[in-house]
Amino acid sequence: MAWTIDYEGGPGIIVTTYRGTSNVHDLRDATTAAIALGKTHESWRFLTDASEGTFDVAPIALLNLPAKQYPAEGADRRSRLALLLPSAAKDRALARFYETVCLNRGWLAQSFDDRDEARGWLLEDAGS
């Protein structure tokens, strides 16, 4: 398994971390686990750390996450999705595509190079 899921209880952030190479099955499984953990903790702040990952996936797989899997698994539309970008150019392009697809499908997503900036953005709405 090239991914892990953690819950940061203080700020209420679900963190998915990718290391090594992930395929479409990894993305689907990690998404299912993250949404389930979000429901358990009633948290809709998600940080995806892809900074140490590489991705062997077709763009259609990234399209299907927000277009089909998020709604099918009951993800809340109030979710905030922060993405720490991978370092390789090919993977950064896939990550930016994913960000655009999320936004086009009505999900609030933003990509970052800095973890602290990503966390700050996730917590912007914490008081509301």
Image (tube, helix red, strand yellow):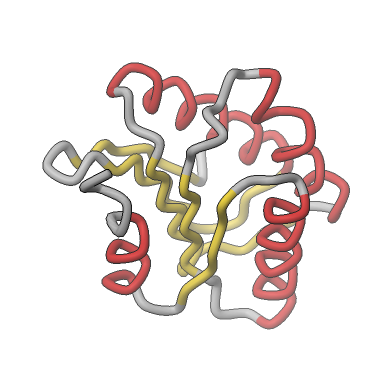
Front-lying residue, 108 or 94: 108
Q: Residue 57: where, in percent of width, then height? A: 78, 52
**In the depicted structure, whether residue 106 falls above or below residue 88:** above
Q: In screen coordinates, is 49 left or right of 31?
A: left
Q: Is residue 102 above or below residue 84?
A: above
Give 68 or 32, whichever is nearer the viewer.
68
Q: How many numbered discs sit on the rendered protein?
A: 0
Q: Position of residue 7 (x, y in %)?
A: 26, 36
Q: Quadrant of the C terminus?
A: top left
The image quarter in which residue 9 lies? top left
Quick one: 61 or 68, which is closer to the camera?
Answer: 68
Report which quarter residue 36 is drawn in.
Answer: top left
Left or right placement of residue 43 versus residue 1 in this view: left
Q: Residue at x 77, y 54 (%)?
A: 104
User: Which percent across, then down, holds residue 19?
Assistant: 47, 57
Which residue does the image show at 36% across and 77% down from the upper left?
114
User: Residue 11: x, y in percent?
Assistant: 18, 46
Q: Residue at (71%, 58%) from the top-left corner?
A: 98
Give the answer, above or below, for where 20 lies relative to 88.
Answer: above
Nearer to the camera, 97 or 18: 97
Is residue 96 left or right of 9 when viewed as pictured? Answer: right
- Residue at 50% across, 61% down: 83
Residue at the front extreme, as displayed: 128
Q: Name the image quarter holding residue 14.
A: top left
